[in-house]
Amino acid sequence: LEAAVAAGDAAARSKSNNGKSNNKNAKKQKSAAAAAHDDDVGVGGGDRPSVEELAAFREEHGIRVAEGVPDPIIRFQDAPFPKKLIAALLKQGYTSPSPIQAQAWPIAVTGRDVIAVAKTGSGKTCAFLLPALSRIVKQGASAAPDMEMVDGRFRPAAV
């Protein structure tokens, strides 16, 4: 995962240079990241953020949550997703989750409902989709339910 983080950093620097990266090491890091990632779940890399840092993160981004809500995941390395999903995000140049992703992911992976309001382009789709993709990667896809036509619409068949 560390190689994926390094490759993500290199990709982010490359994007900030308008794609004009002449750094041969960045290409090597990307190759190492592709070879290093597997289906294991990210388990963090180093120190976890302190309670004060997490509170400051919520304050800075105007995140309000109910009592007992899990702490936000403010680094990809701490996300409970398969390494290959995290590596894919890093490879695209993302360096950290957006605020909506950081707070929605730990709630969604526990199976709880999430109601969130955020601006267009803030990462809401990824906030809700990545936990679903993670589950599919870990457990495999389930069969679609049998459907039947009822009043001109397809609906799940009765069990």
Image (tube, grey):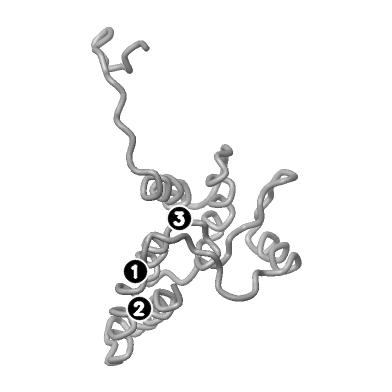
Indicate the secondary structure of the residue bearing disc 3.
Answer: loop
Residue, x 27% and y 86% (percent of image)?
A: 20
Q: Residue at x 50, y 68 (%)?
A: 96
Separation of disc 2 and disc 3 at Cα?
Answer: 19 Å
- What amino acid type should be assigned to the residue bearing mark 3? Gly
Q: Amino acid at mark 2?
A: Ala
Contact flag, marks 2 and 3 (Cβ < 8 Å): no
Alpha carbons under labels 1 and 3: distance apart: 14 Å
Pick the quarter of the image with the N terminus: bottom left
As displayed, is residue 4 above or below residue 152? below
Image x and y of residue 130, in percent: 42, 51
Q: Are marks 1 and 2 in contact (CB under 8 Å)?
A: yes
Q: Which residue is mark 1?
A: 92
Q: Which residue is mark 3?
A: 123
Mark in the foreground, 1 or 3: 1
Residue at 31 percent of width and 14 percent of height = 157
**Disc nearer the start of the sequence (2/3):** 2
Report the disc number at residue 11.
Answer: 2
Q: Name which quarter of the figure residue 22 lies in.
A: bottom left
Where's residue 74, x and y in %?
58, 65
Residue 56: % across, % down? 71, 66
Which of pointers 2 and 3 indicates the residue nearer the eye? 2
